[in-house]
Image (spheres, rainbow, N blue to C red):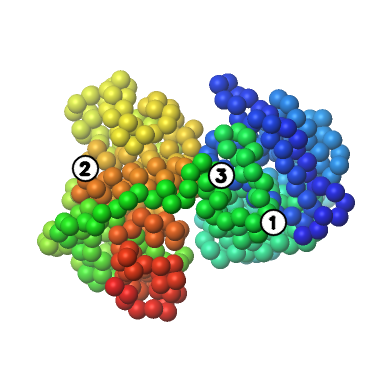
Amino acid sequence: MSHDGGAALTLTNLSKQFPGVQALDGVSLTAMPGEVHGLIGENGAGKSTLVNILAGAVTPDSGTVEVRGERVERLDPMTSMRLGIMVSHQEIRLASNLSVAENILFGGLPTRLGAVRRAHARSLASAALEAVGVHIDPRATAGDLSLAHQQMVEIARAVRLATSVLVLDEPTAALPQHDAEALFEAVKRMCDRGIAVIYVSHRLEEVLSLCDRITVLRDGRKVADRDCTDTNRSELVRLMVGREMADMYPERTAPREKVLMRAVGLRGPGSPHGSDLEIRGGEIVGVFGLIGAGRSEFVRLIAGVDPVSGGRIEIDGEVVSHASPEDAMRRGIAFVPEDRKGEGLVLDFSVAENLALPNLRAVAREYSLSRAGLAEFAREQIRAVDIRPDNPNRAVVTLSGGNQQKTAIAKWLSRRPRLLIVDEPTRGVDVGAKAQIYALLADLAAGGMAILMVSSELPEVLGLSDRIVVFHNGRVAGTVSAADATAEVVMHMALGQLGEAA
């Protein structure tokens, strides 16, 4: 990290008020050339407003912005770009019908005599993709890419043009581990070029390992600046939410109910290995494994999302087969998928409409699908899981990540499932909302529901599970009880270095 030449970015006493909300209140931040500066806080803490100010999309009510010592009277998108400030937003903003190259070079395609130099454009796009460590055909249509590759294209576009400040807003939320590691290397190369990187993320382990310094926001105010060498995850959680990390996970009591569901030798098409798993009523079983280990693929078989090619599923000791999620639901199995925006919710629908989707027959019979009836049906679910704001007619797309996730869970609860499968229940969710979701899952288990929770966050699995089932190379590598589980034991299993532990 180099501090030559003064600050790359200086924000002084920035404030911004929206109707009824003080989004920022006197926030100051200094980012140095060659530094990775973390920006953390719960949803609503002010991070997005600060990012949008740097992008030129929002004008602060007061305060000053300086870029490499030059005071900027007004930031708009073109001025931000001219000053070398580039933002890679959390929400992917690609033109899905254009090629990868056209998206990366948008507004700056090389031309000759009015014609686009396509070979040169592909070369420039390939160089930008290589800079972030990913190999994608620049001729591919952006809308045909996976979510992870779309994210890397978004980042490559920002990296290509950043010369002063690069803002990465939740850049790894949709990335598998190998792409995330490639991104970290790209960030380090940007720092070697003297660019200041502002790194916004809910993943505190990532922030601590990558960043030099961290600014913590809470309720629109800056509550702390910390050098990463002088802090830890527990302190950062306390600064963000005003409580200790130990309070994140609710107390659990050992389940005493009988086995509800048992999978024996279960496997899907193309999988050479079958796996066994059982879960009792009132039990939270965590499912852990590295990216590509097969954990999500396995639970999708249980949920009826993907076809079973071998093995069996037993419910209450009876062998069952279900050809669809609706078949599974009739047997008391509900599934909240990993991709809540693509599979779990209809973002343009209201909260009430999303909550009603799995319950249309009951809602139609009782309320005739009137808007007032839908709202009345939804209010009970909204109260049960504390969705905020509590307006049933609000579009789901306008909710925070945590409240979207609570909606994705709540829509199944009126069906009273016996087994709830949740895949990555807190992905893209801030620390405060995580604690609420943990409490919700614990309450459901205390009421006798079985919870099968897939997560890539090891602290989450360790903190909430009664037992942990670990996947490696497409099959169960081992099972360990909560009493015997440590990060080292679980990670050894995930790496295929340890057998059955409990």
Foreground: 254 or 105?
Answer: 254
User: Callout 2, which amino acid?
Assistant: Arg
Task: Specify the quadrant of the image occupied by residue 500.
Answer: bottom left
Is residue 115 positioned above or below 73 on the image?
A: below
The answer to whether the residues at label 2 and label 3 have Cβ atoms under 8 Å apart is: no
Q: Residue at x 78, y 41 (%)?
A: 10
SS assignment at label 3: helix
SS assignment at label 1: loop
Task: Return the residue at label 3.
Answer: 239
Q: Residue at x 32, y 65 (%)?
A: 483
Task: Return the residue at label 1.
Answer: 212
Q: Residue at x 73, y 26 (%)?
A: 62
Q: Residue at x 36, y 55 (%)?
A: 464
Q: Position of residue 494 (x, y in %)?
A: 42, 71
From the image, which quarter does the N terminus lie in? Answer: bottom right
How many angstroms separate mark 2 from mark 3 (CA)? 37 Å
SS assignment at label 2: loop
How many angstroms separate mark 1 from mark 3 (CA)? 18 Å
Q: What label sits on residue 15 in the rendered view?
A: none
- For the residue carrying disc 2, how many other residues have a C-alpha within 10 Å: few (<14), some (14-19), or many (20+)? few
